[in-house]
Amino acid sequence: MNNPVLRFAILGCGHIATKMAAAVKTLEKRGMGVECYAVASRSLDKAQKFAQEYGFGRAYGSYDELAQDSNADLIYIATPHSEHYNNILLCLGHGRNLLVEKAFTANALMASEVVALAEEKGVFMSEAMWTRFLPAVQMVKDWILAGKIGKVESVEADFSMPLSHIGRLHKPELAGGALLDLGIYSLTFADIFLTDEKIGGPANHIVQTKTKCVKFHTGVDATDWIDLVYAGGQVAHLKTSMVAPLKNEGVIYGTEGFIRVQNLNDMEEIQLFDVAGNLEESVKPPRIENCYEYEVLGCKAALEKGLRECPEMPHSKTMQMMTQMDSLRAQWGVSYPFELSPGEVWDRSGDKSFLEVYDIETGETKQLKEFDKVIEAPNWSADGKFLTYNSEGRIYKFEIATGTITEVPSLFVDNCNNDHVLSPDGEGLYVSHHTKEDGLSRIYKIFFDGRTPELVTPLAPSYLHGITADGKALAYCAERNGEYDIYTIPAAGGNETQLTTAFGLNDGPEYDCDGEYIWFNSVRSGRMQAWRMKADGSEQTQMTHDAHWNTWFPHISPDRTKVVMLAYHERDVRPGEHVPNKNVEIRLMTGSDKTGWSEPRTIIKLFGGQGTINVNSWAPDSKRFAYVRYEKG
């Protein structure tokens, strides 16, 4: 920002905009480097009345007019959160810097797209989660770090308010319900005080979530209970409701006392109690106007430093919280009309499958067979004579020359998913099988001659993806203590070794033919991309940088000069999703460490996703690979 004064504009003239306008007017009056520049409404009359009341210099009768005003240094989007996505796209299209009221968007899919677009355009954008900008937050942390309550053990938070009379909160089509309006504050309170490394310990992420909601008669969530367990052993008990009586309080419990915060959103008062419950200290943190001013000042400071996001509320935190709320809604069965429900996405009844081979040199596709059911994840044998695939829990062998199909005898291993590799000794396959005891995936070896399957990974869930050329080690994705990371294990069984620790999903590990590198995909950058590391987990390097695509399952060819991968467009999946029934692309990257690696290019567009190319399907000549496309029944 080149101007000494931040020209602040507001898009939308509803209730929340009046709060922000009052804060900005106070900053302007006090000479704190902020100007009440412009407001916009879909009604010019409403915008003019708002501008007059709060002292803004310009009034626009459309959002587009404000978005086109290049003199606006920062536009605050104050519309209902169901409208944020379109409002953000409009403003980013004109290169405007943005402060977006919470909830940032209606879901993580929308958030992912606009965050990527803002980063690509080099435009500043921050979520207006005002709580994270408050001086009170640091005051509470200072008490904790000074040992005034001992070691933090748990957090309770309840933000409930009878708001069911507000029409938009009834409506699923407006992303109504308690969670996005009120629940985000309870979730934020726990996140602030339990994931800070100085308080909760390094990487103190959530490892378990238990939740329940009571729905409003329209289908949105009315009252929500959320219990979280963290890696450091701390717990959070959270509640939110749009129908219950008013309660707005958070408590942080330690071994030597507790801290009570009146009002989760603006932290009006903080109180320190000893272990016996005696009040020792009470402070009302400073406020210039109504506490909305602190996020404005935070944005101003970030813009003056040339930053593209606020350190108090970075894009990664916005995505984390949006993804968490999506996950909660999925568990409650709450979705919005503009979203596909999980049931719709995963409904594969009647799907047809087409087993096909792509020739890299000619660019031609050959169909091997059509199936009137779902088949997934072909592997290509080392002698080039057959493919294996999974279908309806079993593994099948497809002879390429004759088209003959035989089931691989696997006895009780009868619930295999699309994670499997052929054993280099030619005896059979290693597969991921959901065991009957708990339904979790474990790795087994099954045999072509029908021998009893052998268990490799007692711990679950474990999802197989790679094997060394000598067959001595396996690489797989596993969930341990709430995080999905990449592990290796001797193929004969034994102790597993963890290779990745990055937050978020790390998946699809696959050895190259020399066993030097493991290729995999990771969401750690904010979007799922292809990565590579040494077989011991060192030198973890991002290999693709697709701004608008989520890249899954990089498969390295036997000659180590080609990598094929599956790509979903950002509008179709959240970064950590790998689902069926989507239009996807198969991309090819070529090169070597000596010559460098090319940017991925699209070689096939198809309807597919989950099951298309989950595991390595390269032919031994490195000239062809097999895949599956689908057709909706």
Image: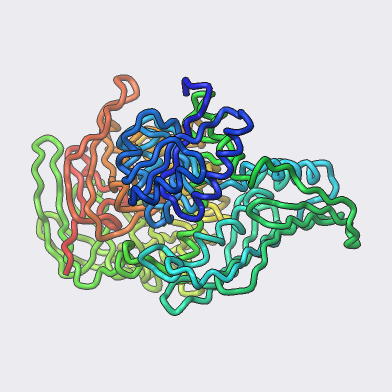
Looking at the rendering, which quadrant does residue 235 occupy? bottom right
Q: Is residue 251 above or below residue 589?
A: below
Looking at the rendering, which quadrant does residue 23 occupy? top right
- Residue 430 seen anywhere in this rendered image of the structure: yes
At 70% from the left and 41% from the top, the residue drawn is: 135
Q: Position of residue 67 (x, y in %)?
A: 34, 38
- Tell me: 496 left or right of 248: left
Q: Is residue 72 above or below residue 102?
A: above
At 52% from the left and 66% from the top, the residue drawn is: 178
**Relative to the observer, which residue lies in front, 52 or 508?**
52
At 52% from the left and 76% from the top, the residue drawn is: 214
Protein image colouring: rainbow
At 51% from the left and 32% from the top, the residue drawn is: 35
Q: Position of residue 414 (x, y in %)?
A: 36, 71
Q: Position of residue 50 (x, y in %)?
A: 45, 47
- Tell me: 505 left or right of 261: left
- Tell me: 617 left or right of 470: left
Q: Position of residue 14 (x, y in %)?
A: 46, 54
Quadrant housing the C terminus = bottom left
- Residue 469 seen anywhere in this rendered image of the structure: no
Q: How many marks?
A: 0
- Tell me: 513 left or right of 179: left
